[in-house]
Amino acid sequence: MDSATLPASEDLGHGITAIDTGFVRPFFDASHLLVENGRAAFVDVGTSYSVPGLVAVLEAKGLRPEAVDYVIVTHVHLDHAGGAGEMMRRLPAARLVVHPRGARHMIDPSKLRAGAAAVYGEEAIVRNYGELVPVDPSRVIEAPEGHRLELGGRPLLFLDTPGHARHHLCVWDEASRSMFTGDTFGLAYRELASPRGAFILPTTTPVQFEPEALLASIDRLLAYLPAAMILTHYSRVTEIGRLAADLQRETGELVALGRREDGKRDRAAHLRAGVEELVLGWARDHGAPLPTERIRELLALDVELNAKGLEAWLDRDRR
Ligand SMILES: [Zn+2]
């Protein structure tokens, strides 16, 4: 891969680089490369199709694949961890760091693949994610609550942050006072930022959305007083207090919608329409600088996933 085909990347300072994984559309899904004293780690890696570009950015920074100590996945959803096995195949010294509940799915991705096929459809899996490569168990580090690692002497602390998924961890980087949040601190697509700042919305993807746990996890992240949250969708945000308040309010509105529509006929269609109305309203109130139709397109996938995730939560809640 020559420099002309390098994916878009942005230097965030403190040895952190955001790299576009190319999944879905530009600036939808980020991987973050962290470099300290010549040693490197990736936090989330997109899909198998993202891997050549991520390695090319690494090499463009003068680092060899052997310099990568860790491939960290915040959780095992495929837009974060689908490329982990392929990445590990290319990084001979790396170990995969994953939540204890996600580890077995990285070692044997067959259930993960079947689960994703149930949500997205089999054809979309092949087209969008490619091959899920198993990771040798000897190369896997399970990172429970409070786990600590050092990257070139730089401490990284792992937090158990359920709510979006039970296999979700966040990574506290004391050196930059940044929290790598995966999907726990929601989604902030850059196209929807306005003069008010970043636009944020929660992600309630199936099948493990748990609103109480999500709100508690957000509170835990805030307790570290981060200077920045670094989201997979998409990268760094800094107005933490305002964004956290937005996320808490929006999550409450999604939960209220779910409870209101639960038990009604055509619940799925009502939830879909209701989620769309909510997110378009939030974007409009925020002053997102795009026509409503364009915002509807940009958020269509998240509307779909959030509606399905609310259904999965309501069904689980009733059992
Ligand atoms: Zn996710």
Image: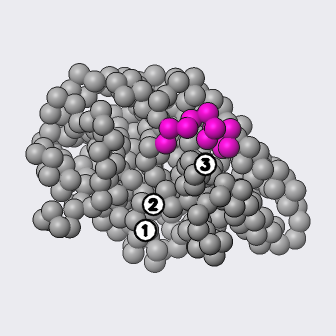
Residue linked to disc 3: 196
Residue at (89, 65) in percent of width and height:
264
Residue 98 screen position, x and y as percent: 40, 39
Tell which of 179 and 150 is nearer to you. 179
Q: Specify which label sits upstream in the sequence, 1 or 3.
A: 1
Write the start and end of the magenta stretch as one range. 237-247
Image height of 150 relative to 76, above or below: above
Tell which of 17 and 161 is nearer to you. 17
**Could you say which quadrant of the image residue 150 lies in?**
top left
Neighbour tally class for label 2: few under 14, some 14-19, many 20 plus, Cα within 10 Å: many
Mark number, residue 155: none
Q: Is residue 120 magenta?
A: no
Neighbour tally class for label 3: few under 14, some 14-19, many 20 plus, Cα within 10 Å: few
The quarter of the picture where the N terminus appears is bottom left
Pair 2/3: label in front: 3
**Could you say which quadrant of the image residue 288 lies in?**
bottom right
Residue at (14, 51) in percent of width and height:
59
Between the C-alphas of marks 2 and 1, the distance is 6 Å
Residue linked to disc 2: 28
Residue linked to disc 1: 25
Residue at (87, 56) in percent of width and height:
260
Between the C-alphas of marks 1 and 3, the distance is 24 Å
- Kindly indicate whether the residue at mark 1 contacts the one at mark 2 (C-beta within 8 angstroms): yes
Q: Is residue 53 left or right of residue 188?
A: left
Tell which of 73 and 184 is nearer to you. 184
Q: Is residue 242 left or right of residue 318?
A: left
